Image (cartoon, coloured by chain):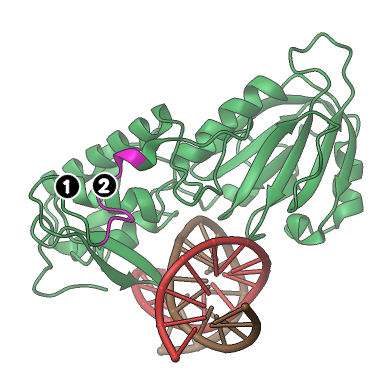
Chain colours: A green, B red, C brown
Amino acid sequence: MPELPEVEVVRRGLARHVVDRTIAHVDVAHPRAVRRHIEGGDDFAARLVGRTITAARRRGKYLWLELGGEGADAVLAHLGMSGQMLVAAPGRPDEKHLRIRIAFDDDGAHPSSGTELRFVDQRTFGGLAVSPGGSELPKELAHIALDPLDHRFVDEEFVTALRRRRTGVKRALLDQTLISGVGNIYADESLWRAKLHWARPTETMTRPAARLLLGHVKDVLTEAIGAGGTSFDALYVNVNGESGYFDRSLAVYGREGEPCNRCATIVRRDPFMNRSSFTCPKCQRRPRRPRL
DNA sequence: CATTTATCCTGTAAGC
DNA sequence: TGCTTACAGGATAAAT
């Protein structure tokens, strides 16, 4: 599932393969993939043709491709649960869930000349849209907090904001308006490293405890990027179709019934927000007054 | 206003 | 074997 590390790996692939290339054709095969582009698929395509991609950027789980020329618009993308950005040879057979195809007008100078960009998305929670230019950050992302790997992220502001919340610590980690980029997998991994239960009320966390948690969040995200991301359900791949291998380093996520790496206690799974939370019941004590 | 819940979607796997 | 059901979960609209 694409969280910050997976999106960052994809962003790096896009920076390598499509930046400095000019768009020649755009085919929208499924309207749902551009549902956030209010003007529709035809307008989406028309706005891209002839534009040159000048940069690939990311905040949290969002990424965007900056477009040169008038307007300085951007193609804003979210991978949702199963979105893939694939760099493919044009002759390769279409993927079953191919949603958008972007072809380029290459003169042979770019190392990736001749390839096309495909947005493939099985569960259709992801999508692309053109975001009007004029600001450094696409305006649709104004409510998305800085992610913890952004150099502008201020640790002490996060610590203060976290402790001001009146909710469970995992809910807070998943709140993209508080800290962006963390999803279910890395939330569980960070909490395990910090020895915190997901239902721990944020208001009971000390500042040092919050700092330690944040440090673990940064560590796990950084390590996962280094491993090429987590391909737990094989729906996540990089732009070349390759899986990441951080799943081998997961301590609790998806390990129900297996022994904790620290104390060998059996990892348990709890229902949480229409999904699951994985914890070691010994390392991560359930609070007396849990906030679900 | 702050917080929580329901909803979107499809493929896989478990259960009967 | 074949059908039904549960599950995966990010973002957001709607509800509390």
Amino acid type indicated by mark 2 = Ser
* Picture quadrant where residue A101 is located: top right
- State the residue at coordinates (72%, 37%): A74
- Does the segment drawn in magenta span residue A6? no
Query: Is residue A150 among what the camera can see?
Result: no
Residue A218 lies, in percent from the top left, at 31, 36
Q: Which range is magenta?
A: A248-256
Question: In front: A35, or A224?
Answer: A224
Question: In front: C9, or A181?
Answer: C9
Amino acid type indicated by mark 1 = Ala
The image shows residue A17, relative to residue A177, as above or below, that is above
- State the residue at coordinates (80%, 44%): A94
Establish whether labels 2 and 1 are both on one chain.
yes
The image shows residue A169, relative to residue A16, as above or below, that is below
Mark 2 Cα-neighbour bin, 10 Å: few <14, some 14–19, many ≥20: many
* Picture quadrant where residue A239 is located: top right
Question: In front: A276, or A64?
Answer: A276
Question: In front: A83, or B10?
Answer: B10
Q: CA distance from mark 2 to mark 1?
A: 6 Å
Q: Which residue is mark 2?
A: A190
Q: Does residue A45 appear to the left or right of A215 in the view shown?
A: right
Residue A2 lies, in percent from the top left, at 51, 47
Residue C14 lies, in percent from the top left, at 58, 83
**Regarding mark 2 in the picture, which secondary structure is present there?**
helix
Q: Are marks 2 and 1 in contact (CB under 8 Å)?
A: yes
Tell me the number on the disc at residue A194.
1
Mark 1 Cα-neighbour bin, 10 Å: few <14, some 14–19, many ≥20: many
